[in-house]
Amino acid sequence: MGILLILLLVVVVLLLLLLLASVGQLTPDFYASTCPQLASIVAEQVYQAAQADPRMPASLVRLHFHDCFVNGCDGSVLLSGYEQLAGPNLNSIRGLNVIADIKAAVEQACPATVSCADILAIAARDSVVLASKPLCNPGWTVLLGRRDSLTASEEAANVGIPGPFLNVEQLNANFANVGLSPQDVVVLSGAHTFGKVHCSFFSDRLYNFNNTFRPDPTMDPAQVTLLRSVCPRIFPGLGGTVSLDQGTRFIFDNSFYQELQQNRGILQMDQELSRDPTTAVLVSQLAAPDSNFTTIFGQAMVKLGNVGVLTGARGEIRKICSQIN
Ligand code: HEM
Ligand SMILES: *[C@@H]1O[C@H](CO)[C@@H](O)[C@H](O)[C@H]1NC(C)=O
């Protein structure tokens, strides 16, 4: 009887282990013994990149987001061609060279060990910490163990990555496709607290809102005037870029939500977040001077980083992020 019970227990434990392995959970210490220098190598490289280009932290965070929304966080956006040619990415994603440089440094220290998808996830976290006011954002614990995809898809990128003219309901549906919640929509959009946007994504709001040949009446008129000085009326594609958060341009903080409350949001989808009754309350909480935005943002980034990951024996560890082995 005793032996049978022990046997049963052993079987149950084995089954549980098998289940865990197949679910493929990410862990914070995945490379603790195989690449102990990983965190410091990535942090140093992101720091150097940010010194050279203060916009780069924002670009790296967006790159991670665009990776995760297309077949999961699997480094697919890094493969040359494919997703990089999709509408939301073409002439718009940045930081591919930075990731390539980080990967080269990591390969030198720990060859054929760390995935490009994991490097991107760590770089995104380091970017947020670096762009925050000194010592005011500890960031979050990045879970690791992702593997790199063998494929990428331009079509999946066009379908999966949300566009700037969606309303809250449509954004919620888009995020639900990858298992993210309506709260995640509001909190992760807070990444628009830094970085830049091309005029073509919002110039209708300056000149011809809903084909009225007038600016969006809900945008602060001073903001309209300011943005018009950068974005030409015709051929908006020729215009430059403006900061998504005109309050504190390169700083990662909650000023983006405060701008929304003053009707100074740039993208239509951002401004909708403070207008839609289902999201307005959360926006005003996040805009408060003592809000816990950075904490909640970190939690949402962990969720984002878990989307559709390849673990175990699936995928591969790329040698070069821009091509499969
Ligand atoms: C909710 C739906 C979202 C839409 C419709 C959207 C749309 C956009 C657009 C149109 C741009 C400007 C791109 C350009 O002009 O080149 C942009 C920039 C950016 N987005 Fe989003 N975004 C969304 C969510 C997110 C999320 C979830 C994150 C990250 C967690 C994010 C991070 C960024 C950052 C940091 C930039 C600036 C990038 C740079 O300066 O290089 N966005 N986004
Ligand atoms: C953040 O603040 C809101 C209220 O402003 C609260 O409901 C929520 O529990 C807080 N979250 C965390 C993780 O502290």
Image: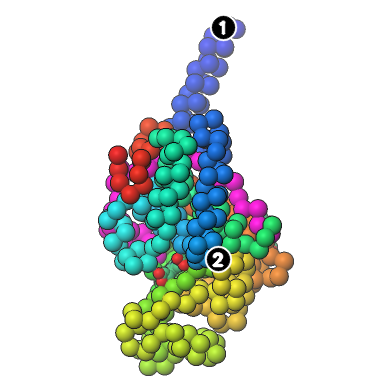
Q: Is residue 39 magenta?
A: no
As drawn, which residue projects farthest toward the right? Answer: 290
Q: Which mark is residue 190?
A: 2
Residue 254 placement, left or right of 25:
right
Name the residue located 39 percent from the left edge and 55 percent from the top edge: 97
Residue denoted by label 1: 3
* Residue closest to the eye, 44 or 129: 44
Foreground mark, 2 or 1, reads 2
* Residue 182 appears in the figure: no
Disc 2: residue Cβ within 8 A of ligand 1's nearest atom: yes
Q: Report x, y in % for residue 244.
A: 50, 73
Name the residue located 59 percent from the left edge and 62 percent from the top edge: 131
Ligand number 2: quarter of image: bottom right
Residue 218 placement, left or right of 207:
right
Secondary structure under tag 1 reads: helix
Instruction: Tell me the amino acid under the disc marked 1.
Output: Ile
User: Which span of residues is magenta-colored?
Assistant: 136-162
Instruction: Tell me the amino acid under the disc marked 2.
Output: Gly
Q: Report x, y in % for residue 305.
A: 49, 49
Secondary structure under tag 2 reads: helix
Would you identify the image quadrant in which residue 39 lies?
top right
Is most of the magenta stretch helix, strand or loop? loop
